[in-house]
């Protein structure tokens, strides 16, 4: 727990550095491309277009409760790809950029945070796109939008803890990134990102009713609640508790392994 | 100038490199859990190094290849961590090495800004200093070219220019200027002397005896991981030259024998040996002091073990999460499951909740195939309209179906 507090303190103290680092690393990568930083906006839009074509036009699928399927899907994808990118890219950031940080005077623990900052643009475009489309269907900003102050911090804390934990695992076990990719591809379908699992009669209702215990689904649904004003977070009852517990667990474990491993990273790479 | 302030203090410093057969996961995990393993071949790059560097000193580090010079400078700059012992550093450390922390795709100008931002300068400060840095680096029109196109000399110049404008308290120069040409080296030297006069500490790692003689107040002579001598250049340099000449004169075979002997010593070293060395250094040490030293050596670093409280919290979180997971696949509520845990675990698990408790849509199955999707959470009128547009059955038809199923 001491480590977790230290980790959070470091994040706050070096947040400015993390933002600068992120800006320059995106700048550095985007300078190789002709369109440069435009890709930050284009990439999520192209992804959305592809998914719209396949699932919206070809498969004619609908969202549960008669919600506008496009907005429903965009928000799901925005939240999910954000978590996916933060966790997969963030976990690589420590091994990749360790050399850079060692010569400067700031802790390695801000590397995942720095890569997280870079994905906020993509996140806001996708979720923002979802919200705008929802407005075309008559879901205008409501009091439920206040929930963003609840779900957004949770999203950040959860993604960062996961990414920190995975980064430590990856230092010790470099093959972990492949597993991470497979896990995320599976979760994409298993967390109701583009399908509602309720559509499939093969899955027992037992698991459908327990879906919210999956932290990824919890967050995705949370953001959908914001857009469509379905319910307040306290209506989710014990699932809130489950989510907070698992996040706390991940945060403590991740901070502890990170601190344990930090002094040895140079020996391992 | 306050010359009494200690800038760098190293005590009983050792660095062990584990010569792992391969850097595989098993070995890494093992070295995390327990730091000693008899089968492993260890190589002690540094053995029992203690020294103090004060304010305004320029200290040279000399030694043959493989003496541990770079290891030492890396430990001081914080790039690698020591195995035992303490390093106390008072102030900001900056290291010069070609292309340290530079992004090849960015231009020289952007790299200057990036590096300066990372050490915590504000944009305004950087704007003020930018012209100075560019002028000092002598890069001229190349400053707006990507750094990846620079030659090694240009990179070193840029790196040095950025560093001297960062105003560090301690500078480590690891053969950094050997790539620069004469005029640039002269300019840098002048700058470095200015730094020294301002009371800044410089650690110079070099093979170039002339530079060391000219710049340094004191010299650390490293020989295969040990401090062979520490003193003024006037004392040390003749001795070092004598040693180097002696070594040069040895036949190739004798050189190899000498090297192997020293290497073997580095292999055989251990923490216990270190303890013996430390204790024998000062035979007058009291028992309490001995205890303290032993403790210090053992401690080496904060091992970051979870405290009891944290362990309790971690387990509580994990078990709590699993419990909520179990409740979610049972037909009861969290509070009731805690009130009657026995009944919950034996009877209530793996049962569907009553349909009225499920907020999202529920699939009604008749003879094994899904027939309709019922909306229980139908709050807004547009839902129904949409559902009708999408070709879904309206609530009425569903109601009929349900009625039919009941009959």
Image (cartoon, rainbow, N blue to C red):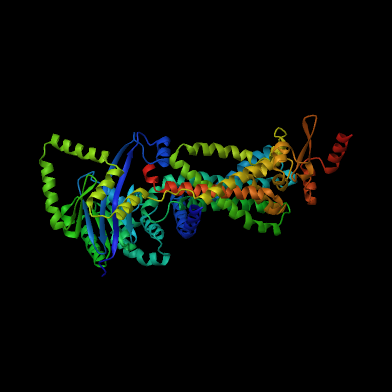
For the question of whether residue B103 can be seen, the reply is no
Q: Is B197 or B242 nearer to us in this picture? A: B242
| Image position of B20 with respect to B176: above or below | above
Please tell me which residue is depicted at 60% across the width and 39% down the height of the picture.
A187
- Residue B209 shown left or right of residue B29 in the figure: left
Q: Residue at x 67, y 42 (%)?
A: A211
User: Is residue B136 visible in this depiction of the protein?
Assistant: yes
Q: Looking at the image, is A187 positioned above or below residue B216? A: above
Number of disc labels:
0
Judging depth in this view, the residue of B185 and B24 nearest the camera is B24
Q: Residue most toward the right?
A: B407
Q: For residue A52, what is the image quadrant?
A: top right
- Residue B15, how many percent across, how many down? 31, 46
Asked if residue A247 lies left or right of residue B115, the reply is right
Give x and y (percent) for residue A72.
Answer: 68, 47
Query: x%, y% of residue A219?
Result: 63, 48
Q: Is residue B30 above or below residue A122?
A: above
- B128, B364: nearer the viewer: B364
- In the current view of this chain or complex, which residue is farthest to the front? B287
Query: Hey, which residue is sitting farthest top in the picture?
Result: B367
Q: Position of residue A261 (x, y in %)?
A: 43, 46
Quadrant, the C terminus of chain A:
top left
Along the horizontal axis of the image, is B407 left or right of B161?
right
């Amino acid at each position: 727990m001491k480590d977790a507090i230290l980790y959070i303190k470091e994040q706050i103290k070096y947040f400015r550095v993390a933002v600068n680092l992120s800006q320059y690393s995106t700048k550095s990568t985007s300078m190789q491309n002709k369109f440069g930083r435009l890709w930050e906006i284009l990439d999520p839009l192209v992804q959305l277009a592809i998914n719209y074509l396949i699932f919206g036009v070809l498969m004619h699928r609908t969202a549960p409760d008669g919600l506008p399927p496009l907005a429903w899907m965009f928000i799901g994808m925005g939240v999910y790809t954000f978590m996916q990118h933060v966790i997969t890219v963030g976990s690589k950031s420590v091994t990749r950029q360790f050399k850079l940080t060692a010569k400067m005077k700031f802790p390695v623990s801000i590397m995942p945070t720095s890569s997280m900052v870079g994905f906020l643009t993509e996140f806001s475009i996708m979720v923002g796109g979802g919200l705008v489309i929802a407005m075309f269907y008559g879901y205008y900003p409501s009091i439920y939008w206040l929930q963003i102050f609840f779900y957004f911090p949770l999203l950040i804390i959860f993604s960062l803890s996961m990414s920190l934990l995975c980064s430590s695992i990856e230092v010790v076990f470099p093959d972990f990134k492949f597993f991470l990719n497979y896990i995320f591809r599976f979760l994409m379908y298993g967390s109701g990102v583009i399908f509602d699992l309720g559509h499939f009669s093969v899955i027992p209702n037992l698991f459908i009713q327990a879906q919210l215990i999956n932290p990824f689904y919890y967050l995705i649904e949370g953001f959908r609640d914001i857009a469509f004003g379905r319910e307040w977070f306290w209506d989710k009852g014990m699932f809130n508790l489950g989510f907070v517990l698992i996040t706390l667990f991940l945060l403590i474990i991740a901070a502890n392994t990170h601190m344990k491993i930090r002094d040895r990273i140079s020996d391992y790479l | 100038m306050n010359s009494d302030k200690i800038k760098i203090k190293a005590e009983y410093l050792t660095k062990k490199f584990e010569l792992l057969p391969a850097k595989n996961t098993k070995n890494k995990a093992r070295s995390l859990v327990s730091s000693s393993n008899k089968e492993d071949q260890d190589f002690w790059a540094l053995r029992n190094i203690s020294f103090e560097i004060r304010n305004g000193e320029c200290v040279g580090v000399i030694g043959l290849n493989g003496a541990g010079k770079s290891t030492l400078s890396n430990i001081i700059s914080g790039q690698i961590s020591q195995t035992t012992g303490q390093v106390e550093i008072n102030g900001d450390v900056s290291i010069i090495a070609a292309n340290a922390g530079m992004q090849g795709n960015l231009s020289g100008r952007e790299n200057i800004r990036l590096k300066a931002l990372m050490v915590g300068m504000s944009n305004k400060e950087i704007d003020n200093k930018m012209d100075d840095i560019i002028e000092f680096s002598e890069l001229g029109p190349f400053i707006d070219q990507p750094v990846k196109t620079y030659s090694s000399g240009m990179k070193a110049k840029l790196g040095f220019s950025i560093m001297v404008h960062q105003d560090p308290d301690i500078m480590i120069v690891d053969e950094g200027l050997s790539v620069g040409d004469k005029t640039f080296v002269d300019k840098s030297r002048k700058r470095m002397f200015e730094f020294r006069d301002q009371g800044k500490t410089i650690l110079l790692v070099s093979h170039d005896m002339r530079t060391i003689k000219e710049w340094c107040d004191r010299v650390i002579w490293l020989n295969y991981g040990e401090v062979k001598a520490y003193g003024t250049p006037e004392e040390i340099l003749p001795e070092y030259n004598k040693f180097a000449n002696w070594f040069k004169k040895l036949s190739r075979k004798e050189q190899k024998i000498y090297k192997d002997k020293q290497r073997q010593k580095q292999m055989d070293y251990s923490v216990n040996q270190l303890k013996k060395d430390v204790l024998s250094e000062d035979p007058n040490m009291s028992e309490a002091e001995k205890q303290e030293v032993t403790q210090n050596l053992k401690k080496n670093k904060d091992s970051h073990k979870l405290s009891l409280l944290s362990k309790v919290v971690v387990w509580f979180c994990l078990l709590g999460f699993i419990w909520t997971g179990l409740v979610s696949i049972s037909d009861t509520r969290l509070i009731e499951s805690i009130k009657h845990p026995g009944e919950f675990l034996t009877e209530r698990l793996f049962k569907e909740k009553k349909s009225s408790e499920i907020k999202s849509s529920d699939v009604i199955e008749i003879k094994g195939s899904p027939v309709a999707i019922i909306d229980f959470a139908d709050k807004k009128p547009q839902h129904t309209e949409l559902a009708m547009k999408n070709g879904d059955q309206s609530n009425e038809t569903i109601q009929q179906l349900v009625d039919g199923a009941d009959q």
